[in-house]
Image: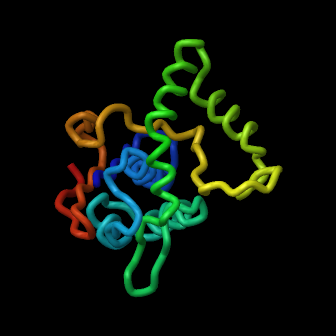
Amino acid sequence: MLIRIDPTREVPVFAQIAASIRADVVAGSVGPGDRLPSAKQVAASLGVNLHTVLHAYQQLREEGLVDMRPGRGAVVAAAAGPAAELRDDIGRIVARAASLGISRDALANLVRDASGGAGPGGARGEARTGFEPAAHIRPPIGAASGDALGAAPDEGVLRAEGAHATGGVR
């Protein structure tokens, strides 16, 4: 798992952390039951406040992508499986929207409108995974590896294998 932040962006750091983890879930590099690095490890590796990381984990929990388990920390939820299965479909939709000149923000709004936009279950009450597109977040493009994502020298980067951090702020 690779968690990236860019402190020069206008997007809040907690939202960047959540987006990075969300992208790994959709890419399938982490799956249901996988343990995320502790908030303390992420905060230390990225050089951010612990509460910033906890805010990101809370956002992912509200989306249904992460379960917070006492004594075990943050664990990828079962809802991550269906979200990862949509990866190819999402890629095709994003590419089609771009070819039609539709911005990512407009596309995210269209998805929100199509799902009813009324919280978990939508306006019609159908079950949803809890995965919500974040229109204000620029997801990484390309493979899930750090080199393919082109980390800038001032970006905070955390590489993790299971719950063990193996990298830090560059």
The vertical placement of 65 against 86, above or below, is below
Report whether 128 appears left or right of 151.
Answer: right
Image location (x, y in percent) of residue 79? 52, 60
Report whether 118 appears left or right of 94.
Answer: right
Report whether 123 appears left or right of 94.
Answer: right
The vertical placement of 69 against 128, above or below, is below
> What quarter of the picture does the N terminus occupy?
bottom left
The residue at the far left in this view is 166
- Numbered marks: total: 0
Viewer-closest of 107 and 153:
107
Image location (x, y in percent) of residue 61? 54, 66
Viewer-closest of 34 and 1:
34
Image location (x, y in percent) of residue 13? 46, 52
Residue at 34%, 66% (x, y): give it: 34
The vertical placement of 144 against 141, above or below, is below
Which quarter of the picture shows residue 35? bottom left
Image location (x, y in percent) of residue 129? 60, 56
Viewer-closest of 62 and 56:
62
The vertical placement of 64 against 145, above or below, is below
Residue at 37%, 61% (x, y): give it: 48
The residue at the far top in this view is 100
